[in-house]
Amino acid sequence: MEPLVVAEHLYKTYRDGTRAVVDVSFRAGRGVTVLMGPNGSGKTTTLSMIAGALKPSRGRVLICGYDLWGDGWYRARECIGYAPQKMPFVERLTVLENLVWIGLMRGLSLGEARRRARRLLEEVGLPDVGGKLVGRLSGGMRRRLTIAASLVGDPRVMILDEPTSGLDPGARESLWRIIRGFSGERAVVVSTHIPGEAEEYADKVLVFHRGRLVAEGPPGELIARYAPESLVEVEGVIPPAMGSVGWRIVEATGDRLVVASRSPDSDLPRLIEWIVSSGGRVRVARVRRPGLREVYFALTGEALEEGG
Amino acid sequence: MGSGWRVLSQLYVAVKGLFRHKGAVFWIIVFPILFYTLMVAIWGSPSYQPVSLGVVNEDKGDGYYNFSKILLDTMNESHLFRIHYYNSTVEMVNAIRRGKVSVGILIPEDFSENITQVRPATLHLYYTRSPWSSYDTGVVSGFISRFSESLRSRALNISLQYALQYIPENMTRRVREWYGFVEKPVRIVNTSYTPEMLATKEGIRAFYAIGMIGVEILFIGLSAGVFAIIDMKREGTLSLLLSSPMRSWEAFISLTLEVLYGVAISALAVLLFSLPLGASYHLTMGQALALITLLLVGTLFTIGLGLILAPLARSQEAAMAIVNGLAFPIMFIGGLVIPDFVLPAYLRSFAKYYPLSMSIKAVRDMTIYNATPREALVEAWPAVLATVVVYLLGFVLFNKLVAQAAEE
C-alpha cells in the first residue's frame, strides 16, 4: 500500500541563504511518525513543507498519492489536517465557533461543521467548553482543541507541530493518548524535542540534526542499532583493579562504578558478586537502559535534553 | 458547494465575533457616530454667522431726522450683523486688525444733516484686505447700498410728485418712466425655489451621514487591503489557509465579504443614528438598490487600492503609516467630510475624480437631490470602471503576496 506521506529530497533554503532543510526524504504510513530533534534542527520546516504551508526550494511531497505542490495540490490538501505549534484561534470566538470556522475554510457546510465540531470536542475530552471563549481555556485544554481543529476536515493525514510543548508531564501523557487514539486509520506526523515521548508513543521516529534526517525507524530498532549498551551502575565501596576482569568501564571511582553492557540482566548479578568477593561492598545497584536520547548522542555527538 | 462555504469563512468570523471585539465596535460603530455627531453639531444647520461689525457713530443729528439711528436699527433688525460700538476710529481700527470685528463703519457727525438737507452724505467703511473678510465687507456694502437706494427712491418720488404738477398730461407717462430709470436702471426679477434638501436641516444631516459612510469605507477598505497579508502572517492564519484546500480567489472573496459586513454595519449604525438627529431619506426601491451598488463600488475600489499598496507595507508600522497617511488627507480633500465646493479649485478635481468620492457624490445626489438611480449610476460610471480595474489588480497582487508568503 502506498504510504500516505511521501517526502522526496526536500530542501529549504531561505532568501538570506540559511539552509533549514537539506535533502530530507521519508515515508509515513498509518500510525504515529515522530520527527525528533532539538530546536532548529529542521522539524518545523519539514512539517510546514509536508503540510502545504511552506513551499520547498526543491523536492516533492505526495500526500495520499497527490502531488502537494503540483497538480494534485487540491486533493492533497483535502487529505491534510494541520496544527502549527501556535494554532491561530480567533480569540473573540468561542471554542465551537473556532472549529466551525476551520470547518468552513475546509469546505464543510455550516451544519456539517457544527456537527463535526461537537463530536470532536467530545472525543478530545472537551464536551462542556463549546460555548467558552478560546482565550479562557487552560494551556492543556487549548492543546486538545488544537488536536480537534486539525481533525475538523476528517483528514487522512494529521500533521501536528510540537503539540505537547509547554505542558506538564500529566497533560502531555493524556494528550499523547488522545493523539494515539486518532492514529488508527490515519498517518499522524508529529514533531517533538522530547526523546521520551518519541520512544513511548511513536511507531516510527525520524531523527533530525542540523536540517538533515540522520536516522529513521521504529524506536526499538534505532536503540538496538545505535545505542545497544545499557549502563550498569553500582554505588558502595569499589575495590581497585577493575580493568583486569574485562568489564567495559564508563566511570570508576572509589564509591561508584558504571560499566557498559549489552546483557545487563545477567551482568548486574555478576558484577555485584565480583565486588563483594573482592572485598568491596554494594549499597545501590541499578541498570540504566538506553533510549532515544542515547541514540541521538550516538548519531550526532550532541546531547538532546528532555527540556529541549 | 465547498467553494461557497469557504468564501463565507471570514464572514462567519465577522458575524460571530464583531460585537465581542471592543476595538472593532469602537471603530466601526462608536467612532462614526461620534464623528457624525460632531459634524452635525458644527455644520448641521443652515444657519449663517452674523457679520461682526464695528461702528463709530459721530452723527449729531440734532434737530434733524436721525438717519444714522434708522440705519443702525435696520441693521440690527436684519440679524445679519452683530454690532460693536466704539468711541473712536482708532479703537475700531485696532479691533479690526486684531480680528475682533471684520468690518467697521464710521458715521460722520453731519450724516443726518446732509441727508435732511438733500446733500450727499458720506459713510466710511474699514476692513482688512484678506480673502476671509471679503464676504463680510460685501454684506455691509450691499446693506448700505440698499439703504442708499431707498433714500434715493424717496427723494426721487418727492421730486416726481412736484414735477408732475407742471408737466402736461400727455408727458406724464414718459416722465414717470424717466424717474423710474433714474431710480433703478436695472431691475432684478427674483424667482425663488425651495431647494431639494441641502439647504435644509434634513439635507445637511443626510449629507454628513453619507460622508461619514464614505469615511468608514475609506478606513475599513484601505486597512483591509494593506493589512491583509501582514495580519494573516502575524496571526498565523496564513499557514492554515495554505494548508487548506482554499483557493486564493476564495480567500480573496472571503476577505471582501468580511470588509463588506463591517461597512454595512457601520453604514447602518450611522444611518439609523442620523434619523433622530434630523436626517431624512426618502428613497425608492430603485434608489436604495443603486445606493447599495454605489457603496459596494466604493468599497471594492478601496480594498483594491489597499492591496495595490500592500507590497510597500513590510511591517505593521509601515502598514499603519500608509493607511493613516492616505486616509486622513483623502477624508478631507476627497469631499467626504468637507463639501467639495468649499475646497480650493486645485483640490476640487481630486474630489471630482477620485472613485470613492464619485460614488459618494452619486449617493448624495440620490438621497439629497432626489436624482434617479439611472442619473446616479451614469454619473458614477467612471468610478465603476476604475473599480473593476483596481479590484482585479488587487486580486492579482493578493495572489502574488500569498504565493510569496508560501515561500518564506
Image (cartoon, coloured by chain):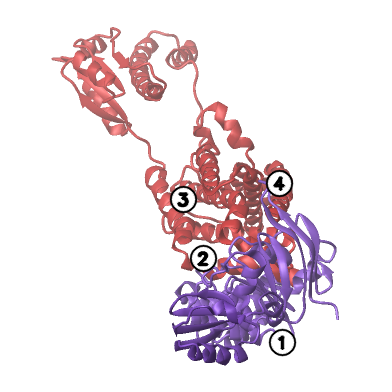
Asked if badge 1 and badge 3 are on a common chain, one would say: no
**Chain of the residue under label 3:** B
The image's mark for residue A109 is: none
- Cβ–Cβ under 8 Å for marks 1 and 4: no
Q: Which residue is denoted by mark 1 in the rendering?
A: A184
Image coordinates of residue A193 in percent, x first then y, are: 58, 70
**Of discs 2 and 1, which sits in the foreground?**
1
**Of discs 2 and 3, which sits in the foreground?**
2
What hue represents chain B?
red
Left or right: residue B64 compared with residue A256: left
**Of discs 3 and 4, which sits in the foreground?**
4
Q: Which residue is denoted by mark 4 in the rendering?
A: B384
Image coordinates of residue A60 in percent, x first then y, are: 81, 62
Q: Nearer the viewer, residue A222 or A177?
A: A222
What hue represents chain A?
purple
Image coordinates of residue A194 in percent, x first then y, are: 57, 73
Left or right: residue A18 compared with residue A89: right
Task: State how far apart marks 3 and 4 are (Cα).
Answer: 29 Å
Q: Which element is circle 2 on?
A: helix
**Of discs 2 and 4, which sits in the foreground?**
2
Residue at the (25%, 25%) spot, across then down: B72
Q: Which residue is denoted by mark 2 in the rendering?
A: B18
Quarter of the image for residue A50 reads bottom right
The answer to whether residue B309 of the structure is visible from this angle is yes
The answer to whether residue A52 of the structure is visible from this angle is no
